[in-house]
């Protein structure tokens, strides 16, 4: 019988899970407030420009939490 490899490869693999820290969430709220102030809001929801601004603001923070990139879809999901 072949021996199972029990080596943990998680340190070598890129995460596919989006993790949110309180810092990430605070930055999201701050960015959405700024976008609302700029008028990038409509029908009680952020416009596309606001979501793109949030994605840009959160870019690069995934390394601190071993999370995958926070794209517009995951940002909307967190917000809702």
Image: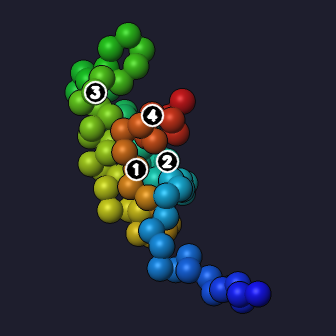
Label 1 to label 3: alpha-carbon separation: 15 Å
User: Can you name the residue that lies furthest to the right here?
Assistant: 1
Tell me the quarter of the picture where residue 32 sits. Answer: top left
Q: Which residue is mark 1?
A: 70
Q: Are marks 1 and 2 in contact (CB under 8 Å)?
A: no
Disc 4 or disc 2, which is closer to the eye? Answer: 4
What percent of the width, then of the height, locates residue 17?
Answer: 53, 56
What percent of the width, then of the height, locates residue 68?
Answer: 44, 58
Q: Which residue is mark 3?
A: 48
Which class describes the residues within 10 Å of circle 1: few (<14), some (14-19), or many (20+)? many
Q: Are marks 1 and 3 in contact (CB under 8 Å)?
A: no
Give left or right: position of 28 versus 7: left
> Which tag, 3 or 2, sits closer to the chain's start?
2
Quadrant where the C terminus is found in the figure: top right
Label 4 to label 2: alpha-carbon separation: 12 Å
Disc 1 or disc 2, which is closer to the eye? Answer: 1
> Which tag, 4 or 1, sits closer to the chain's start?
1
Q: Are marks 3 and 2 in contact (CB under 8 Å)?
A: no
Q: Residue at x 76, y 87 (%)?
A: 1
Q: Which residue is mark 2?
A: 25
Q: Are marks 4 and 2 in contact (CB under 8 Å)?
A: no
Q: Which residue is mark 4?
A: 76
Q: Residue at x 56, y 76 (%)?
A: 10
> Which tag, 4 or 3, sits closer to the chain's start?
3
Q: Residue at x 29, y 32 (%)?
A: 50
Camera-side residue: 59 or 9?
9
Assign a secondary structure to mark 4.
Answer: helix
Give left or right: position of 6 versus 12: right
**Location of residue 60 with respect to 46 vertically, above or below:** below
> Which tag, 1 or 3, sits closer to the chain's start?
3
Which class describes the residues within 10 Å of circle 4: few (<14), some (14-19), or many (20+)? few
Q: Is residue 30 visible?
A: no
């Amino acid at each position: 019988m072949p021996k199972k490899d029990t080596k943990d490869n998680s340190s070598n693999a890129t995460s596919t899970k989006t993790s949110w820290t309180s810092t990430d969430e605070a930055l999201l709220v701050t960015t959405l407030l700024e976008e609302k102030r700029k008028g990038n809001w409509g029908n009680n929801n952020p416009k596309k420009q606001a979501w793109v601004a949030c994605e840009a603001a959160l870019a690069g923070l995934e390394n601190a939490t071993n999370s995958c990139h926070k794209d517009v879809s995951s940002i909307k999901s967190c917000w809702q």
